[in-house]
Image: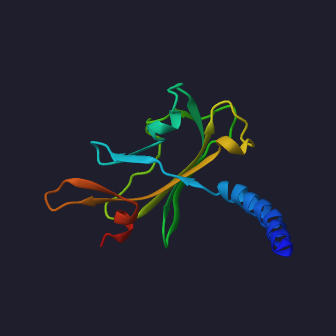
Amino acid sequence: MKWIIQNYLFRLLIFVPVILITGCILHNNVFYTPDIVLKKDGQPCISIPANEDFFMRKKEFSILSLYVFQRRVGYLWKKNFHDYKKPYYVKNQQCLYFNYRFKTNILYSISFFSTEKGNDESQKSTNKNWTRDMRIIKKPDGMLQLLLDDEARDYS
């Protein structure tokens, strides 16, 4: 019986740190989901969700880069904001400036990287990788509709 308990404790001492370490490493690869809505002009408004400013501190986010990607084609548009003299700051729910004209019936992957304003880019805790799939379709009545994630990927 004593041997079983010792064996169990030994395994616990080995596996718990391994699980904790891999959990911390995997945490850095988490993708966050931005809000996307269709504006009146038929173009998407892509923004950081309201819940990112949980305590309503009116904090700003530094946008480090923006990407528009299409599968089987590659990057359609990308913009980096690494020039510290011209930072790009937004608040949550503010439309990001994607200087790209989105077309109907194309599956896009949208992504951007942000950090909280005032934090060093190397401070991993506030760096976030935002990504989402979207497609704009024209319905039979001529109205545009935004499809997101699985619905956008499965549309045919």
Q: Does the rendering let one see residue 125? A: yes
Where 77 falls versus 40 (above or below)? below
Residue 143 % position (x, y) = 19, 53
What is the quadrant of residue 123 in the picture? Answer: top right
The image shows residue 111 at horizontal and vertical percentages of: 53, 53
At horizontal 47% and vertical 38% (from top left) the residue drawn is: 51
Q: Which residue is at 34% across, 48% downward?
A: 43
* Residue 24 appears left or right of 139: right
Residue at 79 percent across and 60 percent down: it is 17
Number of on-image labels:
0
User: Horizontal placement of 155 versus 109: left or right?
Assistant: left
State the quadrant of the N terminus. Answer: bottom right
**Does residue 153 appear left or right of residue 16 in this picture?**
left
**Which colour assignment does the render follow?**
rainbow
Q: Is residue 49 above or below residue 137?
A: above
State the image coordinates of residue 72 (x, y, percent, origin top left). Answer: 49, 73
Residue with the most extreme front position: 1
Residue 75 place in picture, x, y as percent = 54, 62
Q: Quadrant of the C terminus?
A: bottom left
Looking at the image, residue 15 lies above or below residue 67:
below
Residue 66 visible here: no
Residue at 48 percent across and 41 percent down: it is: 48
Q: Residue furthest left?
A: 141
Give the image quarter of residue 8: bottom right
